[in-house]
């Protein structure tokens, strides 16, 4: 079931929550809506669901206009941040709920319901909890039950709003890998709201980055991470260093470092900012032509990686670099010592933020 979002707008009073968004979400894909708080992700999800009406624009499921359809007629399943399980019902009854409230003619037999619920519980690997109450489960287990319950009615579209947001980091990480595997099995078109970059990059087939109600970028996780369309996406998707640079006809200069910037061929001399991820700061063996001199202000060892905080000459900004521990040892670097660094993979944006 593909989902087409066609020029959708939504305001709350004067506040524009969704600003002319057009997107097509592909059949069977798991799409992450990623953005900071207040960027309109949840509002867009609720519009897809039919829990919220857009002021203008249309929603189509597989070409069929669903904009005016009631939420219960859209065939969507939901999982929210706060596991909305019925407290007084067993796990089995919770998962069976959507099937038992169907009109009599569509309602499966008791035996069919039992089989289906047990199959779903096996799928989320919690069949052994069938007779328990939700209060006897951990937070992560409750979210897996909420997902089984959403899947019981065989939704055409599965919508998840920060489903792991209330859980601690370790459980979150486990659940997102688990969701990825489950989605590979069932392939239901799914939309997943998160403000956590790592979660979006790890779980989804496609990432839609939102900011102030607009879509900033839309693509595969690799593409969005490696080729951010603009400074907002660059900064939102991971740690980044910013260097003042001057761009002139295909070359960007950061101090003595000259870098190719072919996208600016023919550009007259302009001020720019170069964006560089910490792992793209190369630390060199020693003094070197075309490198920046820096002092190592802080060394932190995080498992197999060493993070450095460096200060280049005459700079107010700290430069963050990351390198493997063995490389750090080879180079004989020490806190308080000198280093020569060179950005190796940069993205340059002119100061007005526009690519020409
Ligand atoms: P979060 O991660 O914080 O949930 P979000 O990106 O999902 O953020 P939305 O929940 O879509 O953002 O909200 C976008 C903006 O619209 C917010 O500033 C919010 O306060 C506002 N908003 C959402 N729903 C309503 C409403 N029913 N009435 C008034 N304002 C609303």
Image (cartoon, rainbow, N blue to C red):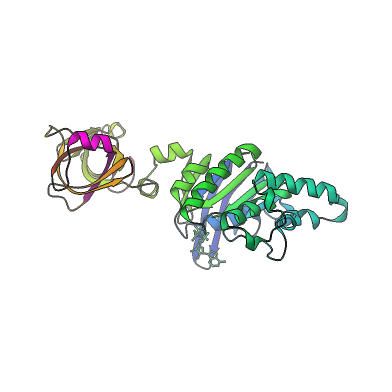
To which quarter of the image does residue 61 belong?
Answer: top right
The residue nearer to you, when weighing 196 against 255, is 196
Examine the rendering and report whether any part of residue 227 can be seen.
no
Q: Quadrant of the N terminus?
A: top right
Left or right placement of residue 223 versus residue 250 in this view: right
Residue 48 colored in magenta in the image: no
Left or right placement of residue 238 versus residue 145 in this view: left
x, y percent for residue 261: 27, 33
Examine the rendering and report whether any part of residue 297 can be seen.
yes
Left or right placement of residue 108 versus residue 229 in this view: right
x, y percent for residue 85: 66, 61
Single out the residue that lies furthest toward the bottom: 13
Q: Residue at x 69, y 63 (%)?
A: 86
Left or right placement of residue 242 versus residue 185 in this view: left
Q: Residue at x 50, y 51 (%)?
A: 172
Q: Quadrant of the C terminus?
A: top left
Residue stretch rendered in magenta on the structure: 318-334
């Amino acid at each position: 079931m593909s989902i087409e979002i066609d020029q959708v707008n939504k305001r709350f009073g004067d506040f524009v929550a969704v600003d002319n968004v057009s997107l097509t979400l592909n059949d069977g894909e798991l799409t992450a809506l990623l953005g900071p708080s207040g960027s309109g992700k949840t509002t867009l999800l609720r519009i897809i669901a039919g829990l919220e009406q857009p002021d203008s624009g249309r929603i189509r499921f597989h070409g069929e206009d669903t904009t005016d359809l009631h939420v219960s007629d859209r065939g969507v399943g939901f999982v929210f941040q706060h596991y909305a399980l019925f407290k007084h019902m067993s796990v089995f009854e919770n998962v069976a709920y959507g099937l038992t409230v169907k009109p009599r003619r569509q309602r499966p037999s008791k035996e069919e319901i039992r089989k289906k619920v047990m199959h779903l519980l096996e799928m989320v690997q919690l069949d052994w909890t069938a007779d328990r109450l939700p209060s006897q489960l951990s937070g992560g287990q409750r979210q897996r039950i909420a997902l089984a319950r959403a899947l019981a009615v065989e939704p055409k579209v599965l919508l998840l709003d920060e489903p792991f947001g209330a859980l601690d980091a370790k459980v979150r990480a486990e659940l997102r890998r688990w969701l990825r595997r489950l989605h590979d099995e069932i392939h239901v078109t799914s939309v997943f709201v998160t403000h956590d970059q790592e979660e979006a990059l790890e779980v989804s087939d496609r990432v839609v980055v939102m900011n102030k109600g607009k879509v900033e970028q839309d693509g595969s996780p690799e593409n969005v991470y490696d080729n951010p369309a603009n400074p907002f996406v660059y900064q939102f998707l991971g740690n980044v260093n910013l260097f003042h640079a001057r761009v002139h006809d295909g070359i960007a200069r950061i101090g003595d470092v000259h870098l190719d910037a072919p996208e600016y061929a023919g550009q007259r001399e302009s001020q720019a900012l170069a964006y560089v991820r910490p792992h793209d700061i190369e630390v060199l063996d020693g003094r070197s032509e075309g490198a920046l001199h820096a002092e190592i202000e802080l060394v932190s060892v995080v498992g197999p990686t060493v993070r450095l905080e460096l200060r280049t000459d005459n700079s107010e900004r700290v430069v963050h670099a990351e390198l493997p521990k063995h490389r750090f040892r080879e180079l004989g670097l020490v806190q308080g010592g000198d280093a020569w660094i060179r950005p190796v993979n940069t993205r340059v944006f002119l100061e007005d933020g526009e690519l020409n």
